[in-house]
Image (cartoon, grey):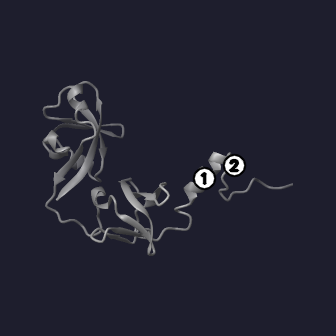
């Protein structure tokens, strides 16, 4: 099975390095020198890591045969995959498996999964709701009790307001009114 681990961003410097949007929870072991990746679009063939380093919180990668900024520019937007023999943990999913799944609350369709944002504390599902707005859903068992890849859906048990809180704040911002966050304005005298 091919597992997506990164998307290549813009070139960095003049020696062929690129920035990488990391899509794995083990980047230090995944991007070691000599690691070979399958690349999409396929016309780019495979890429072998020649250098890997962190610049603050951005991963910089150099690949064999990519030695100039122009070479690096040709890689922009490409996606890196590796071949995995692992059939996987039943409770672990990759972004490419989740994309396009219908999102349901009870039996009702409320949107579609458009991405997965991996975070240090917890992952977030990016959901486009039925009105076209993006909703960030904490990817935890209490809120996402079921992911059924075969049937094509994700079941949510969201806390009240998860699908409306950002929308209400955006509408209030547009109308010039302050959002009511439930706080008081101070003691009355």
Percent of width and height locating residue 162: 52, 62
Percent coordinates x, y for residue 87 in the rendering: 18, 66
Q: Is residue 10 visible?
A: yes
Find residue 50 and name its label: none
- The residue depicted at 30 percent of the width and 56 percent of the height is 95
Q: Which residue is located at x 47 percent, y 61 percent?
A: 130
126 relative position to 174: left or right: left
Can you tell which mark lies on residue 169? 1
Query: Which residue shows up at 26% across the image and 34% down it?
Result: 18
Mark 1: few/some/many CA within 10 Å (<14, 14-19, 20+): some
The residue indicated by pointer 2 is 177
Label 2 neighbour load within 10 Å: few <14, some 14-19, many 20+: few
The picture places residue 31, in percent across and down from the top left corner, at 21, 45
Q: How far apart are labels 2 and 1 at the CA level?
A: 9 Å
The number of callouts visible is: 2
* Residue in the picture at 55% in, 55% down: 166
Query: Please, is residue 46 above or below residue 189 in the view?
Result: above
Q: Residue furthest right?
A: 189
Q: Quadrant of the N terminus?
A: bottom left
- Indicate left or right for 37 with 173 as reference: left
Q: Residue furthest bottom?
A: 107
Residue 83, compared with residue 139, is above or below; it is: above
**Left or right: where does residue 42 sit relative to residue 78?**
left
């Amino acid at each position: 099975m091919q597992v997506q681990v990164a998307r290549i961003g813009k070139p960095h410097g003049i020696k062929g390095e690129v920035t990488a949007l990391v899509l794995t929870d083990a980047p230090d072991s995944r991007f070691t020198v000599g690691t070979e990746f399958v690349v999409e679009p396929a016309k780019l063939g495979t890429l072998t890591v020649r250098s890997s380093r962190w610049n603050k919180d951005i991963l910089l990668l150099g690949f064999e045969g990519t030695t100039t900024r122009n070479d690096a520019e040709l890689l922009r937007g490409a996606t890196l995959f590796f071949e995995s023999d692992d059939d996987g943990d039943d409770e672990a999913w990759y972004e490419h498996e989740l994309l396009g799944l219908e999102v349901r609350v009870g039996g009702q369709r409320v949107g579609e999964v458009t991405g997965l944002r991996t975070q240090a504390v917890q992952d977030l599902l990016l959901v486009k709701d039925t009105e076209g707005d993006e909703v960030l859903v904490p990817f935890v068992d209490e809120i996402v009790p079921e992911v059924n890849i075969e049937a094509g859906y994700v079941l949510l048990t969201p806390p009240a307001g998860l699908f409306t809180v950002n929308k209400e704040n955006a509408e209030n911002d547009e109308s010039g009114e302050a959002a009511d966050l439930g706080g008081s304005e101070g003691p009355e005298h």
